Image (cartoon, grey):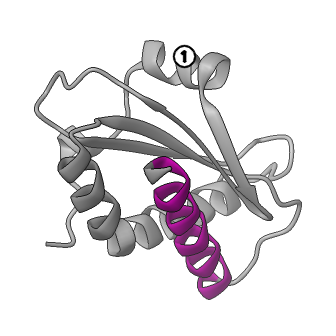
Amino acid sequence: MQTLTKAERLRSRKTISLLFEKGKAISIHPVKMVWMQTANKEGVILQFGVTVPKKNFKRAVDRNRLKRQMREAMRKNKLQLKNFLEEKNKPCALLLVFTGKEAVPYKEIEDKIIVILQRFISGFSN
């Protein structure tokens, strides 16, 4: 099922700051994924959030569009990752950060997120 439930959204400021402090990163321009294992609090195996720096995109319209596109790409492609994490019983929190200086088409964002997720799964299983 390709939905994004409220429980799957990463909202905890504490977890987000921990991600930046202790999380591991996988980067493929223009998207970077910061992740770490978490405690399975709400019975959710995967929590994720997206962010676009104000430094690179001054207008909120541009930031919100990129965030919407990244959330949509993640929503459509998270099933394989979710199944992998359930199989390993390793709950994770991850944050997608848009690192590019200019907006790119949705297809490029989706392709990069797919590659990042595949790299995450192959690196995690070793």
Q: Nearer the viewer, residue 70 or 120?
A: 120
Q: Amino acid at mark 1?
A: Leu
Image side of residue 74 versus residue 97, left or right: left
Q: Position of residue 90 (x, y in %)?
A: 29, 37
Query: What crowding class fits label 1: few (fewer than 14 Cα within 10 Å), some (14-19), or many (20 or more)?
Result: few
Residue placed farthest to the front in the image?
126
Q: Nearer the viewer, residue 123 or 6?
A: 123
Our reading of the magenta stretch's main secondary structure is helix
Image side of residue 13 versus residue 29, left or right: left
Residue placed farthest to the top in the image?
14
Quadrant the N terminus occupies? bottom left
Q: Position of residue 25 (x, y in %)?
A: 67, 41
Image side of residue 18 versus residue 59, left or right: left
The magenta-colored residue range is 106-124
Image side of residue 100 versus residue 106, left or right: right
Q: Position of residue 7 (x, y in %)?
A: 19, 39
Residue receiving disc 1: 18
When asked about the image quadrant of residue 15, the answer is top left
Is 91 magenta? The answer is no
- Residue at 61% x, 19% y is 22
Disc 1 is placed on an element classified as: helix
